[in-house]
Image: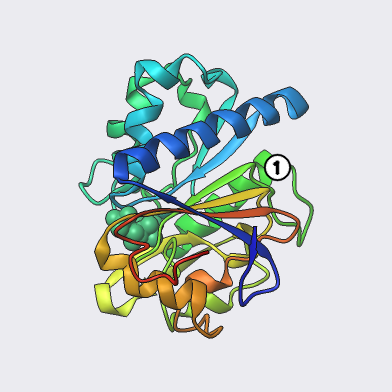
Amino acid sequence: MERGTWNVERQLVVCDDLEALGRRAADLFVTLCGEAVTSQGRFSVALSGGETPKALHSQLHSESYRSRVPWSKVFVFWGDDRYVPHDHPDSNYGMARATLLDQVPIPAQNLFPVPTERKDAASAAARYQQTVKGFFDLSEGEQPRFDLMVMGMGEDGHTASLFPDTAALKSSSRVVVANYVQKLDADRITFTFSAINQAAFVVFLISGGSKALALKEVLEGSYQPDRLPSQFVQPKGGKLLFLVDRDAAARLTPRE
Ligand code: 6PG
C-alpha cells in the first residue's frame, strides 16, 4: 500500500491492458461479494457509467465468473446517472442493463436505478436519496456504507458526476444530489463525496492514455480536489484501489 498526498492509504494496481483490468475487477467483485454475503447476507454495489466499466461487466457475465456470484443476494445502485430516460443511449442504467444485468439471473427487485422519470433532476435526486436511505435503514444525517463503489475518472479528474468547480463538490450532508454540469450543458444525479467516502471499498477503473496526465496529477500532484475531484475520494475506514491499465499509468513515476 502506498501513502498518497491524502490522509488515506490507497493501492495502485497496473494491468497490462483493458481486458486484464476487467478480469482483475471481476476477481475483486467476486471476492468482496462473497465476503459480504457471508458476513451480512447481501452485497451492495454502486456501478459507474462511461465506457471502462464495460470491461468489468463483460467478465462478470462470462462463463468464468457468472456462476461465482450469488446474484439473488447482489443489490445494484448507480453512483451517478445522467438525467435521461432509462432507454436513452446516455443512461448509465441502460448501459449496465445491456452489458451485464440482462445477461445474469439477478432479480429485477435487486436493481435500484436513479428515477430519472421524475419531473426534474432535483426531485430525481431527492427520491433516490430516500431509496438509498430506506435500503440501508439510515437515520437522519447517516451515510450509506456500500460494500463496493465502482468509480471512473474523466480526463479532467472528475468522478461520478462530480465535476471540477461544480456545486455538488461541496454537498456534504446529503447522500445524493442533482448537479448541473455547465460544460456538458447537462443535468446529472450523483452520490456526494460524503456518501462515496462511507463505502467499505472504492475501486477506480481507469484505462487509456487520455487519462495518463489526470491520473498523474491526481495520484502524484498537489492536493487540489476542486480542480481534481477524484482527490476527494478518501474512504474513511474503507479501502481505496486504483485499478488502471498501462496506458493510463504511462506518466506515473516508476516504482522501484
Ligand atoms: C459517467 C461516469 C463518469 C465516468 C468517467 C470516465 O456517468 O460518465 O460516472 O464519472 O466514470 O467519465 O468514463 P470512461 O470510463 O468512459 O472514460
Task: Say which of 208 and 128 sits in front.
Answer: 208
- Left/right of residue 82 with respect to residue 131 in the rendered view: left
Res. 64 image quadrant: top left
Instruction: Dividing the image into four quarters, tell me where ligand 1 lies.
Output: bottom left
Task: Say which of 198 and 35 sits in front.
Answer: 35
* Residue 215 location (% of width, % of height): 41, 69
Q: Quadrant of the N terminus?
A: bottom right
User: Helix, strand or loop at disc 1?
Assistant: helix
- Density class for disc 1 (Cα within 10 Å; few <14, some 14-19, many ≥20) is some
Q: How many marks?
A: 1
- Left/right of residue 246 with respect to residue 255 in the rendered view: left
- The residue at 44%/42% (across/down) is 113
* Residue 170 location (% of width, % of height): 58, 79
Mark 1 sits near ligand 1, with its Cβ under 8 Å away: no
- Left/right of residue 132 with respect to residue 109 in the rendered view: right
Q: Amino acid at mark 1?
A: Phe
Placement of 167 over or under 58, stated as above or below: below
Q: Residue furthest front?
A: 256
Is residue 100 among the parts visible in the rendering?
Answer: no
* Residue 58 location (% of width, % of height): 32, 31
Is residue 216 among the parts visible in the rendering?
Answer: yes
- The residue at 28%/47% (across/down) is 85
Q: Residue furthest left?
A: 89
- Left/right of residue 14 with respect to residue 70 in the rendered view: left
- The residue at 46%/21% (across/down) is 106
* Residue 250 location (% of width, % of height): 33, 65
Res. 60 image quadrant: top left
Placement of 161 over or under 131, stated as above or below: below
Q: Which residue is mark 1?
A: 136
